[in-house]
Image (cartoon, grey):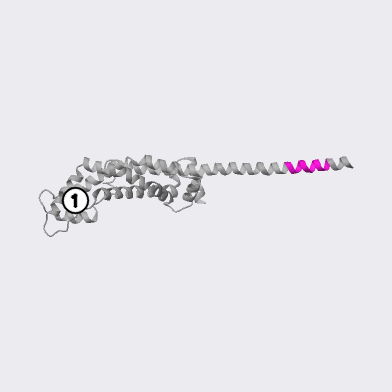
Amino acid sequence: MKYTLLFMLLGFFSLTVQSQFGDLLKKAKEVVTGDREDLDIAGGLKEALEVGVDEAVASLSQDGGYFQSPYKILLPKEARKVVSTVSKVPGFTNIEKDLTKKMNEAAELAARKASPIFIQAIKEMSFKDASQILMGNQDAATQYLERTSRKKLYEVFLPVIQSALDEVNARDLWKSAIDAYNKIPFQKKLNPNLDDHVNNEALDGLFGLITIKEQAIRQNIALRTSPLLREVFARQDQ
């Protein structure tokens, strides 16, 4: 009787241990699977963002990238009054056309500095960020990039834009126009900040194009050019 009870207890203990081990193994598999899904989601989103960023930067940083696109940078509102007035002064007939071309050339040069900053923001994306982006609005990825990188992009762009504006003599041209305008009697003295305007317009255009690239990948299956992209964005389509 004593031995029978002992065997029964050992058998019960063995079954309990096996059951607990089985539960632990199942949980371990779930964790591993979950980790793999996390990596897939984050990896797929990062790949999609890198594709969109690369295409946007390449498009806008080429010669005529801004000037010949819907993101063409125009003069600030205050500056239009200046150029409208000084265009009547000899030597400034084509001032608006010349300044607009030079501003866009400066933005095209600055855009070439964007990729490393975007790549850093993409690398720092967490799984939580990736999940929210995947199931978020059509521009959720762009919003993430703008939130995490716009300030840094502004800081990096500004000296490049200032240098580029100088390289194409835009700031000298602008100063000449301002000086001519401010010499006209009864005009309120003006000096709109051309550098800041070009910088913000350049960034607006860049994020605007990234939004279009993001929406295209979300909506067009043919643009999901790798198995990982197809697998990850299929979850969004469900």
Along the line of sight, which residue is nearer the eye, 128 or 211? 128
Taking the spot 51% from the left edge, 42% from the top edge, the residue there is 40
Label 1: how many residues lie within 10 Å, few (<14), some (14-19) or many (20+)? Answer: many
Could you tell me what secondary structure mostly forms the magenta stretch? Answer: helix
Taking the view exactly as shown, the residue that stands out farthest to the right is 1
Residue 23 found in image quarter: top right
The x, y position of residue 69, in whole percent, is 29, 48
Query: Residue 107 at x, y = what percent?
Result: 28, 44
Horizontal arrangement in the rendering, residue 139 relative to residue 101 (left or right): right
Q: Is residue 2 left or right of residue 122?
A: right
* In-front residue for pair 227/166: 166
Q: Is residue 189 left or right of residue 41?
A: left
Give the residues in magenta.
Answer: 7-17
Quadrant into which the N terminus falls: top right
Say which residue appears at 22% left-offset and 45% top-offset: 102
Asked if 215 appears above or below 109 in the picture, the reply is below
Identify the secondary structure beneath mark 1.
helix
**Badge 1 is on which residue?**
96
Residue type pointed to by label 1: Glu
Q: Residue furthest left?
A: 90
Front residue of 58/189: it is 189
Residue 28 location in percent, x, y?
Answer: 63, 42
The residue positioned 20% from the left and 55% from the top of the image is 80
Position of residue 233 measured from the top left corner of the image (x, y, whole percent): 48, 47
Q: Residue furthest bottom?
A: 186
Would you say residue 113 sits in the magenta stretch? no
